[in-house]
Amino acid sequence: MATIIDGKAIAAQVRERIKKDTQRLLSLSGIVPGLAVILVGNDPASKIYVRNKKSACEDVGFKSFEYLLPPETPEAVLVDLIEKLNKDPEVHGILCQLPLPKHIDEKSVIQAISPLKDVDAFHPVNVGKIMTGEYSFLPCTPAGVMELITSTGIEVEGKKCVVVGRSNIVGKPMAMLLLHSNGTVTICHSKTPDLKKECLEADILVVATGRAKMITGDMVKPGAVVIDVGMDRDENGRLCGDVDFEEVSKVAGYITPVPGGVGPMTIAMLMKNTYTAAKLTVVK
Ligand code: GUN
């Protein structure tokens, strides 16, 4: 039976460290990190994510600024708000919750955020820095996954790593971080001819496809570290991941649960990036 990686507990440790660093930053420089979160529309899942981000800010001692805009908000109004926040000295991080309504061009919005306040690390400048390894911010989910892997005590260096999913938010940067840690990395996707064969070779398997329970026990190498980024619903409407936990936990060495695995780490890493953005304004 696999050891369960407790993302909730590890995220709580990260947040505790950030809380202490935030108190020190305040006493040394008078700065309180501030995060602005923008939500356009009424998507219920996005509303929950935004609420969780706000309460995480309060928990670690940040200021949080929330902008809830109606679904019909024109793109120009959203970009104007972002430009105002780019200039606001109390705001160190800006996050615009995705997805955006269809009439708004996501790329234009991401590019409107100052790279220095881009705590999602979605701006092309920050994406480029991830490629070369000179980053200030890492995208929150892949950064959280790296912390979870580190918590197992298993070194990435020299390991065969397989990432299933190639999104800009998770799959692609995830592969890059594993590569920076000297893993040998394969990225699989919907057109990969033999997914089972690729997964069976993985010492470290990271799954981010959005397809409920698609990784079954027969696809996993005994003893592997399995990280499940999915947040799906099963046939009974219950929350589950992209990995069939019941089957895979009998084969893997380590596994993350859903919920309580990657999710809490993503928010902890957002707090870390916001703290870093605030600290960078002092060092400059
Ligand atoms: N929607 C789902 N995940 C994310 C995320 O990490 N950042 C933003 N901005 N929107 C999201």
Image: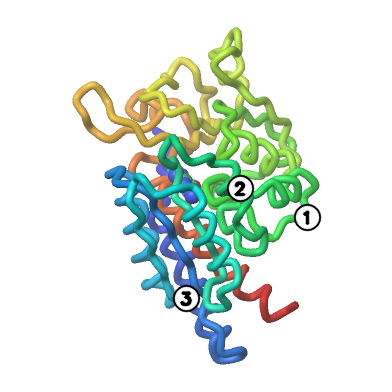
- The extreme left residue here reads 236
Mark positioned earlier in the residue sequence (1 or 3) = 3
State which tag comes first along the sequence, 2 or 3.
3
Is 133 on the left-hand or right-hand side of 168?
right
x, y percent for residue 34? 49, 73
Rendered image quadrant of residue 55:
bottom left
- Please identify, in this view, whether the residue under mark 2 or under mark 1 is nearer the observer: 2
Please indicate whether residue 229 sits to the left or right of residue 43 in the image.
right
Mark 2 CB lies closer than 8 A to ligand 1 = yes
Q: CA distance from mark 2 to mark 3?
A: 25 Å
Q: Amino acid at mark 1?
A: Glu
Residue at numbered disc 1: 134
Which residue was labeled with disc 2?
122
The Cα–Cα distance between marks 1 and 3, rounded to whole angstroms, is 26 Å
Nearest-to-viewer mark from 2 and 3: 2
Residue in the foreground of this view, choosing between 121 and 176: 121
Toward which corner of the image does residue 155 lie, by quadrant? top right
Residue at disc 1, secondary structure: loop
Residue at x 78% of width, y 55% of height:
134
Q: Is residue 6 visible?
A: no
Tell me what residue is drawn at x 60 percent, y 74 percent: 278
| 85, above or below 38, in the image | below
- Crowding around mark 1 (Cα neighbors within 10 Å: few <14, some 14 to 19, many 20+) is few
